Image (tube, helix red, strand yellow):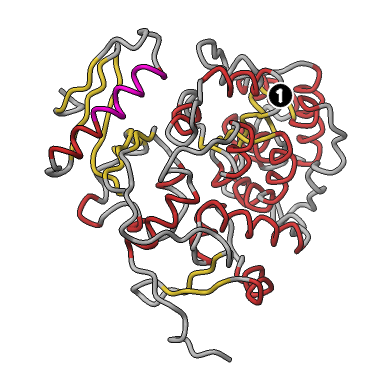
Amino acid sequence: MASRTAHPVLDTRSLNRATLARQLLLSRAAMSAQDAVAHLLGLQAQNVKPPYFQLHARLAGFRPAELAELMESRQVVRMVTMRSTIHTHTAHDALTLRPLVQGARDREVNYFRKGLVGVDLERLGELARAFVEAEPRTMGEIREELLTQWPDADPQSLSVAARCRLPLVQVTPRGVWGRSGQVRLTTVEQWLDTPAAAAAPAPLAAPAPLAPPAAPPAPQAVDHVVLRYLGAFGPASVKDMQIWAGLTRLREAFERLRPQLAVFRDENGVELFDLPDAPRPDADTPAPPRFLPEFDNLLLSHADRTRVVAPEIKGRTWVGNQAYCTLLVDGFVGGLWRLEEGTLTVELFGRVSKAEKEHIVTEGERVIAEMTETGGSGSVRFGSIHG
């Protein structure tokens, strides 16, 4: 067996440049929006606009209408997947990634067991499925329907159980640039006209525990997602992927794949895995400024985020559970930004050179021109985003 010290060490800047290359942030890619959504394993989509800004930062020639058309044609969908958060996924990934995290969603239901005493979860899933497949419903409507069956249950717990037991998608116009609308839900199978058998949750035994873990996905399915994760976020540790997915016990998959992976260590000795032929640019490769929206997966998909967020600014990109829009300067988070009525305000965390400032203004003007309805009129200003 190889020595633990035999693996090459990747310093922070090397990890930064490798990750930016996978994330299409070193240079804009000549890639379709659909291919980019697939490559990135989805786009964090807690709010409506962030997926559009994520693609604008990564793709050459991107316009919001491209993603909006994919939403309306049902080639991409919005649904709860990784980390129990809303993501925009391709139709294929919506059907395959959601079952991967079903065990985590079952555990989430267990947290609400006190509010679900006497509730048959298998029956709940059947009733909720029939209700939302008849026509898309709001979560309030789903909750009220379930309360007719279990009036003594906690309403919020019923909502959580329905959301976790079923692969629910937000139907359009929700998520469509310039339109949006109230959140209405149906099953991914109904929305994509796909048989439900493959993705329907397994029946749950009762009474204790309330929601036992789902049967684990087939090893080959997990291995495939590990390889895709490394392609989009590597080099990465086992814990990194577990943070991204909101799952545990992925070590076994990495060990199965070890013979075909490149192995490194970071400066703290943590073992990192990667695809052998994946890009790992030189640490001095130029990284242009990029305006990232709130909840960009670049900042959420590693256990150790120092590859993008320097320790001294940790905590400055969040208030409570709300994230700010962030600016990358030389590949690292270097400030915050806000766009209102054609004015893009940039709050820098530190001093930048005159050339860097000019590049930030140029990139900001591009955002105004291509991601607003002002016809390109507007300005970039530097100051507090709170002022």
Question: Residue 127: horizontal and vertical position, in percent?
Answer: 80, 29
Q: Which residue is mark 1?
A: 74
Magenta highlight on residue 362: yes
Quadrant location, the N terminus:
bottom right
Task: Specify whether 207 is left or right of 153.
Answer: right
Magenta highlight on residue 99: no
Residue at image position (50%, 51%) is 22
Q: Which one is nearer the viewer's eye here, 199 or 105?
A: 199
Highlighted range, magenta: 361-370
Question: Residue 304: horizontal and vertical position, in percent?
Answer: 38, 60
Question: Residue 310: horizontal and vertical position, in percent?
Answer: 26, 55
Q: Main secondary structure of the magenta part?
A: helix
Q: Is residue 70 above or below residue 19?
A: above
Question: Residue 5: horizontal and vertical position, in percent?
Answer: 43, 86
Q: Is residue 83 above or below residue 45?
A: below
- Residue 155, by quadrant, is top right
